[in-house]
């Protein structure tokens, strides 16, 4: 478990993290969500004791990370996949880390196998694609078999197969009872990976809630329904108290009715429904809206406040 | 890319107790040794340090011995046969110093330092391991180069009858000091790299200390020139490799002590900075 208690961190005149408190529970994947510059990476660095908070406290399983002797055995972290020495082979990179934490040398080949880099283990890391570097970073995080894992934007540069793989990896790590924190600036990515969300903006906590609840609140329950019986279904749903608008291509945009209710109503009246899904676009919009006040940089305008 | 194995292999991990023993310092030394020998630049640096350190001495000795009769006839001619063995060390000291800088600054420029410190949160131990590994590598290679330089240069000087043997008074001291000096400069480079965290800045500071500062201080007015100058690493080393002690410089024992103090003080400062700054 990671516990962040009232943490504030300032870099020069910039308030990176501002009175932030949350806890990351074991046994589930927690998404750490926020726009770029929200303070996600800063928070993760502070968890690892790399940066120290100006005030507040962060503990990992009840202890300060800086007091731990062998970091890899406690917390595995991927902060920046490109933070490797390009002249070193993947195996040598991991071997040095393993040796420093007195881990079995065989562990290096195990994790290389696990992340799919066994065949390029002897190659110099400088020639790796970003996706391969992400896999190497994940291998380093897994090396010490830690109970707490943190990944900062791990899907950047991964191909679709790699994205699917990391999602499965995170879920299986959580299923083993580990604490898994994964950061992203994309809600859609987190919606598919995380069980729980910690949302921050401008260094402040915006939401600490289950993914389902967040989507519920964020999308205001808007559901898209594609059906050849648009007019009839719309009439029935309005009678149930829902609001219905016409979206494109014979699709209804329904608010105020759950997917279950819409499906039941359609079935009861024998109306074929070809598609029934929550409106992800509105979800991203809601997320943007929620964090809009907290976005540090924005296209077309300078910084929002005079803090810089 | 091959398919990915399952995570079942370490499924029991979550239940493993966390009371693992602390990593021993020997593990950190081994880790730093793996890092050092797994990049090509380490070997290039050692080769680059080796060639001039021996070659320059040989060329000068050859030049001196082939013109010995004319040179010796000149009234103000003075030739230090012992110290001349190490004329090439002016170049190799920079290479070893740069090697020391890069041991840590390359981790800062790549960001690898964060991985290193997250893996081993005990920062003083990390710096200590880096210093020990680099110090030993620089000392061993420095001593080897010093012996090779001494024997090859003196072999040439023997041709004109001024060559020294290792058993001659002061010869062994000078050879050991020359190798020791390279280790000192390597560690000074490491400490500067840790303090400045930028390769270019740290290398510039190193050049300033061993090349620029001696020139600047030698331009100072009379008493100050020697009063300050005798504390420069180059002059401290010069005192240790010469046959006769120079009266204007610190005594030999003091020269050795001050030379040793350079890396010690700088590494203590670097350790403090490393511990108290955000990585």
Image: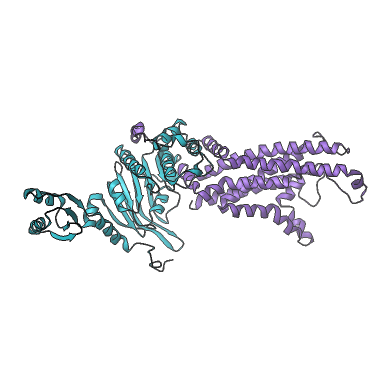
Chain colours: A cyan, B purple
Q: Is residue A9 left or right of residue A206?
A: right
Q: From what the image shows, is residue A34 above or below residue A293?
A: above
Q: How many marks?
A: 0
Q: Quadrant of residue B45?
A: top right
For this view, does B194 lie left or right of residue A253?
right
- Residue B52: % across, % down: 72, 43
Q: Position of residue A165 (x, y in %)?
A: 34, 40
User: Which quadrant of the rendered structure holds the N terminus of chain B?
Assistant: top left
- Nearer-the-camera pick, A83 or A238: A238
Residue A194 x/y as whole percent: 29, 47
Q: Is residue B266 above or below residue B146?
A: below
Q: Position of residue A100 (x, y in %)?
A: 49, 37
Q: From where the camera sits, is residue B170 visible?
A: no
User: Residue, x 66% and y 37% (percent of image)?
Assistant: B140
Q: Is residue B55 left or right of residue A278?
A: right
Say if residue A72 shows up in the picture.
yes
């Amino acid at each position: 478990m990671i516990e962040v208690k009232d943490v504030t961190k300032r870099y020069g005149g910039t308030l990176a993290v501002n009175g932030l408190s949350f806890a990351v529970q074991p046994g589930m994947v927690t998404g750490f969500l926020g726009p770029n510059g929200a303070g996600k990476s800063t928070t993760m660095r502070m968890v690892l004791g790399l940066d120290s908070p100006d005030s507040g406290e962060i503990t990992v399983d009840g202890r300060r990370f800086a007091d731990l002797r062998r970091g890899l055995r406690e917390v595995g972290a991927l902060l920046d996949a490109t933070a490797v020495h390009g002249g070193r082979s993947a195996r040598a990179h991991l071997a040095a880390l393993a040796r420093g934490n007195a881990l079995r040398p065989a562990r290096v080949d195990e994790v290389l196998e696990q992340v799919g880099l066994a065949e390029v283990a002897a190659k110099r890391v400088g020639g790796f694609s970003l996706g391969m570097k992400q896999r190497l970073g994940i291998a380093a995080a897994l090396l010490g078999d830690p109970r707490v894992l943190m990944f900062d934007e791990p899907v950047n540069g991964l191909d679709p197969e790699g994205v699917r793989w990391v999602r499965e990896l995170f879920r299986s790590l959580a299923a083993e009872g580990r604490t898994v924190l994964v950061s992203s600036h994309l809600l859609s990515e987190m919606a598919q990976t995380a069980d729980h969300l910690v949302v921050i903006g401008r260094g402040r906590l915006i939401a600490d809630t289950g993914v389902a609840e967040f989507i519920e609140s964020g999308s205001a329950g808007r559901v898209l329904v594609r059906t050849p019986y648009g007019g009839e279904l719309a009439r029935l749903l309005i009678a149930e108290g829902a609001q219905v608008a016409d979206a494109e291509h014979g699709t209804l945009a329904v608010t105020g009715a759950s997917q279950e209710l819409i499906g039941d109503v359609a079935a009861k009246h024998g109306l074929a429904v070809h598609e029934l899904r929550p409106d992800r676009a509105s979800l991203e919009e809601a997320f943007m809206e929620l964090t809009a006040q907290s976005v540090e940089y924005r296209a077309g305008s300078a910084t929002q406040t005079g803090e810089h | 890319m091959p398919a990915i194995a399952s995570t079942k292999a370490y499924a029991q991990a979550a239940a493993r107790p966390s009371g693992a023993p602390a990593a021993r310092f020997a593990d950190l030394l081994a880790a730093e040794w793996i890092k050092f020998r797994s990049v090509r630049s380490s070997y290039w640096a050692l080769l680059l340090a080796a060639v001039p350190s021996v070659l320059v001495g040989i060329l000068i000795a050859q030049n001196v011995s082939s013109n010995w009769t004319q040179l010796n006839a000149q009234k103000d001619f003075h030739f230090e046969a012992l110290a001349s063995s190490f004329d090439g060390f002016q170049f190799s000291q920079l290479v070893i110093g740069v090697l020391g800088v890069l041991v840590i600054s390359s981790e800062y420029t790549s960001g690898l330092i964060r991985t290193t410190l997250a893996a081993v949160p005990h920062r003083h131990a990390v710096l200590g391991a880096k210093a020990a590994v680099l110090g030993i590598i620089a000392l061993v290679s420095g001593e080897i180069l010093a012996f090779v330089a001494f024997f090859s240069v003196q072999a040439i000087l023997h041709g004109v009858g001024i060559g020294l043997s290792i058993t001659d008074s002061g010869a062994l001291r000078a050879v050991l000091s020359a190798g020791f000096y390279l280790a000192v400069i390597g560690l000074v480079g490491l400490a500067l790299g840790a303090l400045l965290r930028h390769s270019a800045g740290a290398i510039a500071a190193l050049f300033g200390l061993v090349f620029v500062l001696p020139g600047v201080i030698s331009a100072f007015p009379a008493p100050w020139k020697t009063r300050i100058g005798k504390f420069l690493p180059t002059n401290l080393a010069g005192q240790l490799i010469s046959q006769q002690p120079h009266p204007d410089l610190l005594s030999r024992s003091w020269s050795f002590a001050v030379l040793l103090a350079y890396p010690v003080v700088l590494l203590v400062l670097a350790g403090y900075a490393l511990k108290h700054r955000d990585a």
